[in-house]
Image (spheres, rainbow, N blue to C red):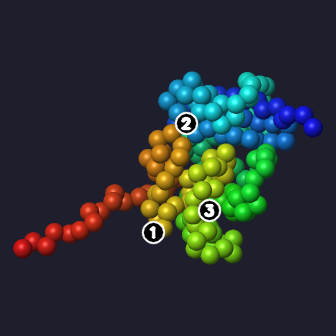
Amino acid sequence: MGQTVHHYLIFETAGGFCGIAWSDIGITRFQLPTKSAEAAERLLLRRLPGAEPGQPSEQVLQAVAAAKRYFEGEEIDFFGFKLDLGEQDGFFEQIYAAARQLGWGHTTTYGALAKQLGAGPEAARDVGQAMARNPVPLIIPCHRVLAAGGKVGGFSAPGGSVAKARMLELEGVHFQSPQPAQKSFGF
């Protein structure tokens, strides 16, 4: 069997430059916004060496248009896009399928997602690892999966947890600034 050929496209959104890659089967990678086209391309190719610029299919063009509208603040869901995630751990597949069901402005926690899949609280770490390795952030909305207590939690995309919070705020989900850990006693 031959090697899967991956093509990609770098495009600009209101949030910055994004990248998308695809195979004959579906979308294989999505790069969240960066400050430059070069950075988006470098980050995308780091995860998909050997991909070449290509002519996007109709589905890929629709995904690009949806991403542009998303970063302009339009309520968009990415449920319908066909993905090609290659060989994945079975539990990661379940995690990704469950995360894809999280609609615009809805959040859950790593632990709640693990529980939803019938796994114990120890599986929250697996959920976190799956989100960190998500090859298609935004399309699988890992930014909507939070740490315990509704805290933002980690985010491996450019800009880290600030980018995650910004995407959620775009969807109307707001976070309070962290409170000081200890109140003064006023002696």
Q: Specify the quadrant of the image occupied by residue 30.
A: top right
Q: Earlier in the sequence, mark 2 or mark 3?
A: 2
For the point 52% across and 36% down, which residue is it?
A: 15
Q: Is residue 122 above or below residue 41?
A: below
For the point 79% across and 25% down, which residue is it?
A: 55
Q: Is residue 120 above or below residue 77?
A: below
For the point 69% across and 71% down, which residue is it?
A: 117
Question: Given the image, on which type of amino acid does mark 1 rest?
Answer: Gly
Q: Specify the quadrant of the image occupied by residue 53.
A: top right
Is there a contact, CB below 8 Å, between mark 2 and mark 3?
no
Question: Given the image, on which type of amino acid does mark 3 rest?
Answer: Asp
Q: How dense is the environment of label 1, judged by Cα within 10 Å: few (below 14), some, or many (20 and up)?
A: few
Residue where numbered disc 3 is placed: 126
Taking 162 as reference, is 42 left or right? right
Of residue 21 and residue 45, the one placed in the foreground of this image is 45
Rendering coords of residue 74 (x, y %): 59, 46
Image quadrant in which the N terminus is located: top right
Residue where numbered disc 2 is placed: 33
Rendering coords of residue 56 (x, y %): 78, 30
Question: Given the image, on which type of amino acid does mark 2 rest?
Answer: Pro
The answer to whether residue 62 is seen in the rendering is no
User: What separation in Å lies between label 2 and label 3 (alpha carbons)?
Assistant: 25 Å
